[in-house]
Image (cartoon, grey):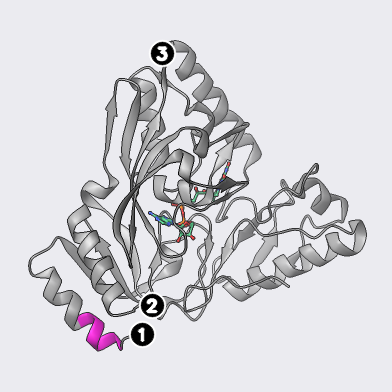
Amino acid sequence: MQSLQTLLRGLRELGRRLPIELHERVELRAWTSLKVGGAADLMVRCNTPEALSTVVGTLGEMEQPFFVLGGGTNVVAPDAGLRIPVLTLGGSLAGLEVDLDGVVAGGGANLTQVCRAVARAGLSGMEELFGIPGTVGGALAMNAGAGGVEICELLDRAEVLRPEGGLVQVHAGDVEFGYRWSSLPRGSGVIVRARLSLEPGDLAGIMGRMREVSAARSARFPRGATAGSVFRNPPGDFAGRLLEATGCKGLRVGGARVSQEHANIVVTDRGATAADVLELARIMRRRVRECAGIILEPEVRFIDEMGQEIPLS
Ligand SMILES: Cc1cc2nc3c(=O)[nH]c(=O)nc-3n(C[C@H](O)[C@H](O)[C@H](O)COP(=O)(O)OP(=O)(O)OC[C@H]3O[C@@H](n4cnc5c(N)ncnc54)[C@H](O)[C@@H]3O)c2cc1C
């Protein structure tokens, strides 16, 4: 772990010849959909694969941990902010290229834009994922899914940067995927790019399905600052059903409240803190454990100022 000054010196040097942007004291509430959290000491935006590779390699040599942030739609950023650098992917790392039977998308590409681009090209497979906020990298790290489709089903191959091993090409068959979980980043790996396999389909049918999916999402998800579902569904049941049955709707801690429309979604008001959300999630979990004997596991990632996941128990 390096001092901020040493890090800044090393990264500024890299910034002279590589397309990276350095930002100090970045408010994480502005970078996360739940709109809580303090400032990260340093954010490094890498705009090409080469820049990302050099930055990750340099941080690896310095034994400096970092946190990769995609769209910030599944992260509860800590009130104390982050003491380790936050890496984000921009420029060509957020680009996409549609081919005859799939798409190659950068880890920083917006998932909804990818869904739109492949649909316009008459490719089918991503309709159910339309409207899941965030990036392709975040979706692969979380194995995001909706409507019975998980992104892992579409993955052909991915390029992952590992601080200790450089860039590796990983085939879908070599990755373990579970429910809202994937081994692809394996610790601190960065998903640089991925190819998703799709099938040619009927343009009108694809567009029609996407409109239906979008309408269903608007009806299902409450408006406001949220991070989607707080808890994973336990086997054979729904977290939302269990939370509703135990009277969680409308519960409030400080500026965080359980949505009246969906018991598995926490909405924050202006001024809410990560501590409010954490405390509320603990109360929700405790209620379900006491009333139904089921232990809910979080889907959102509560992290501390070193980027480590905070356990709810
Ligand atoms: C309104 C709303 C609706 C939602 N609906 C759904 C839904 O239907 N289905 C669903 O599955 N999820 C849903 N989510 C949750 C969230 O959108 C997904 O988990 C999404 O895929 C996260 O992507 P992200 O880019 O925002 O990741 P982030 O929140 O930025 O990060 C999530 C995790 O992925 C890691 N990560 C991000 N990018 C990379 C990368 N390039 N390389 C390595 N690791 C990376 C981060 O370090 C972090 O651990 C919803 C969220 C909201 C706010």
Q: Nearer the viewer, residue 38 or 255?
A: 38
Give the extent of the magenta segment. 3-8
Residue of label 1: 1
Q: Amino acid at mark 3?
A: Leu
Labelled pair 1, 2 in contact (Cβ < 8 Å): yes
Under circle 3, the secondary element is helix
Q: In x, y percent, where is residue 28? A: 43, 69
Mark 1 residue crowding within 10 angstroms, few (<14) / some (14–19) / many (20+): few
**Residues under labels 1 and 3: Cα distance?**
52 Å
Quadrant into which the C terminus falls: bottom right
Tell whether position 4 is magenta.
yes
Q: What amino acid is labelled 1 in the image?
A: Met
- For disc 3, the marked residue is 203
Q: Nearer the viewer, residue 159 or 100?
A: 159
Q: Nearer the viewer, mark 1 or mark 3?
A: 1
x then y, percent, for residue 128:
54, 30
User: Is 203 placed left or right of 264 in the picture?
Assistant: left
Whether disc 2's CB lies below 8 Å from ligand 1 is answered: no
State the separation of the CA atoms marked 1 and 2. Answer: 8 Å
Q: Choose the circle earlier in sequence order: 1 or 3.
A: 1
